[in-house]
Structure formats: C-alpha cells, structure tokens
Image (cartoon, grey):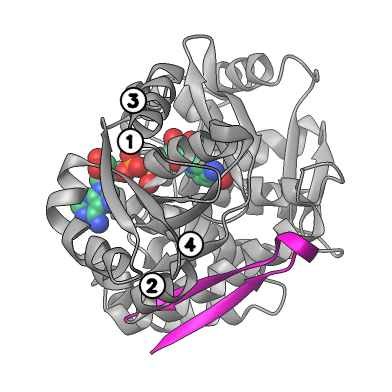
Amino acid sequence: MSTTVRVDLGGRSYDVVIGADAFAGLRRLLAGRRRIALVTQTDIDALHGKIVRAALTETGAQVDTFLMGNGEDAKTLATVERLCREMAAWGLLRGDAIVALGGGIVGDTAGYVAASYYRGVDVVQVPTTLLAMVDAAIGGKTGVNLPEGKNLVGAFHQPIGVFADPAVLASLPNREFRCGLGEVAKYALMDDDAELGAIVRGRSAELVAREPATLATVIARCAAIKARVVSADEFERTGVRAVLNLGHTVAHGLETGGGYGLLHGEAVAVGLVFDLELAAALERISPATAESARALVAALGLPTAAPKGLRADDLLAIMARDKKSRGGLTFVLPGPNGVERVDDPDPVAVRKAFAAIGVES
Ligand SMILES: NC(=O)c1ccc[n+]([C@@H]2O[C@H](COP(=O)([O-])OP(=O)(O)OC[C@H]3O[C@@H](n4cnc5c(N)ncnc54)[C@H](O)[C@@H]3O)[C@@H](O)[C@H]2O)c1
C-alpha cells in the first residue's frame, strides 16, 4: 500500500510515493531506461542498496553504483566533479537517469549532478532520512557547499519522482530521526486545517516509535504541505516558499552560534516555540495556540527551551549578522492570514518570546 502526493508544476509535475510498496513505483517509472546511475553512501548502500538496486535492475537498465562520502564535507563541487567524471567514464547519456538514495546530503549532491551533467538528466529521489522524506527530496532545490557558505552553489532541478518507504527509517540513528521530527512539528504548526497537528498529537507515541503506518500517514501529510508550497512558488520568487522557514530564524541563530549542543531538528523545535510565542506576543495568534504548539513539540520528545545561560542580545547579534544582506530581522509567523513573513517585529515582543524559551534579556 502506498499514498501518492502530486507536486503540481505543469510540465514538470511529479509524484511523491510514500509507503511499503514505493519501490515498485520506482521500477515502473524507470522502465525502459538504458542506464541508471545509483548515487549513495557506503552505509546506506549496505543497509538498503540491495533492494533498490533490485528494483532498478528489474527495469531492464544497466545499473551501476556511485558512492560519495558522509556529512556536509562531502557535499562539495569536488564530489560533483568526481561523480560526473565517473558517470562519463561509464557512458551515462542525457536520456539515462540518476537515482539518489540517501538523506539530504546525497539528494542535494546527486540532484546537482543531475542538474549539471549533460546540462540536465532525469533524477529520482529515494530519501532514506525522515528529513529528506518530508523536506529535502521534494521541491527541486539541489546544490553543494563552498568553504564560504552552505548551499552556495546549486540549481532548481525537479526530480521526476520521489519514492519513500518508511521502513528504511528503522535503521536511522536516533539523532537523525529527531532532526526529521523537528521538521514534522514545523509542518504540523503550519497546516491550515490542523489535520496533521491532530495526527501528531494523537499518535505521537507511535510516531516516536517509528511505527511504519503512522510514519507513512505523517510523511504523506508533510509531503502534501511541501508540495502545495512548492507548486505555488517553485523558484522561491513570490515569497510563498519562505513559509517553510517557520522556526528557522532562531534555529539558525542557535546553530550559527555554535549549536549550543543542539541538533538541527532540536534547534528548529526551539525556534518553533519561539515563533509561536512571538506571534502570540504580537497578538497574531492566541496565547492558547502558542501553548498548544509547545505541547506538540514536547509530545515529539523535542526541546521547548534553549540551553541555559544564553542571552537574547548575543543571539540577536548572531541573527542580525546572519541576515546582514537584508538588514534587520525577518521571521515567518502564523497569524490571521496563515503563516507569512514579518520583518523587524516589536523588540518588546521579541524579548518576551526569548523569555518564553528560557533566554535571558
Ligand atoms: N534541498 C532541500 O530542499 C533541502 C531541505 C532541507 C535540508 N537539506 C539539506 O539536507 C542535508 C541534511 O540531510 P539529512 O538530515 O537527511 O542528513 P544526511 O543526508 O547527512 O543523513 C544523515 C546520516 O544518516 C545516514 N543515513 C541516512 N539514511 C539512513 C538510514 N535509513 N539508515 C541509517 N543511516 C542512514 C547518512 O549516511 C548520514 O550519515 C543538509 O545538507 C541540508 O542542507 C536540503
């Protein structure tokens, strides 16, 4: 059984297939291809490479595996050059396909290889982390890091399909799973009809225990929200796509400041509580809504407060530096018109929101 979410982009539309038989869909989509390059990492290959390669081989294509390293240090132009050269040596042509099997690191890098190689070949995303299933694999943002900054070189290159089998998440290290839960909480709080929030609240224990059916329901709902946003603003031009940054302003501040021992998803969780408290302090939402958001984050086992000893001035200085190019502070906050961008909110409300996540003035 699987659920399909359509990413509606006219001629570039594609399906995100979520469920136990997602890889059968992968086989059907790529049937008839001549060659398929599978890009992955050694650990993921050992865990999940066999089943995906079997599906790809059943298409009748010649399949070869191209390995890349782990972590942000491997998401580089050097990796892109090496992968492109290996694919050229193997004889991959424009009508062939690339399959990215992994988390956001593999997806972003292989996606950028696909955007560039032969000026663009088809890519299929097979996400293996919760973060990639709900976020990175959908929407066509690809790219790599430079020493000067993260994701500085990249391209919009939509996949032709995304195939997510929640069963692969069983092997995901706990800290990586938590990173994905931070993004799930974000979608739950930006969901207009509150359906995802109700599922997450009602089934948080199953979700944290990685029960595949619950995961499939939650991932499908998150994917539908991301698909809707991407369809409305494919190239991040109208500002609609910025709503995906809910919780991320303070999260970036916490991370840029050295992480303070927080993982990305945990920093996002704290950032979500901050944003909802800020929205309440600005009277955009009720205090009860902010309180309920805090409860949702807590139900996922994520932190709702910043580590002790942090000062608002220090974080504000980091956040202002972070946003130097635009000047001032930008948040995306819920309100009567849904989630929208708010520039330079009242400093008194900002301090109140900091206090609500345990950050001293
Ligand atoms: N393109 C986008 O729209 C977008 C959105 C969000 C994040 N990102 C990018 O995604 C990256 C982070 O991605 P991530 O959080 O998925 O991390 P990741 O890709 O580094 O994966 C985390 C770790 O888990 C391992 N792993 C992956 N799947 C596994 C599995 N099923 N079982 C066991 N181990 C597994 C990986 O080898 C890796 O060591 C960042 O570079 C970020 O910039 C991109």
The image quadrant where one finds ligand 1 is top left
Q: Amino acid at mark 3?
A: Ala
Using the image, tell me which numbered label, if any, was put on residue 90.
Answer: 1
Asked if one can make out residue 82 in the rendered structure from this viewpoint, the answer is: yes
Gap between marks 4 and 3 measured at Cα: 26 Å
- Which residue has dot 3 on it? 74
Where disc 4 sits, the SS reads helix
Q: Which residues are magenta?
A: 1-20
Q: Amino acid at mark 4?
A: Val
Residue displayed at 49% across by 42% down? 93
Disc 3 packing (10 Å; few <14; some 14–19; many ≥20): some
Gap between marks 2 and 3 measured at Cα: 28 Å
Where disc 2 sits, the SS reads helix
Where disc 1 sits, the SS reads helix
Q: Amino acid at mark 1?
A: Trp
Q: Quadrant of the C terminus?
A: top right
Tell me if residue 213 comes above or below residue 172 in the rendering.
below
Q: Which of the two residues, 314 or 128, is positioned nearer the viewer here?
A: 128
Q: Quadrant of the N terminus?
A: bottom left
Left or right relative to 131: residue 231: right
Foreground mark, 4 or 2, reads: 2
Q: Position of residue 146 (x, y in %)?
A: 50, 15
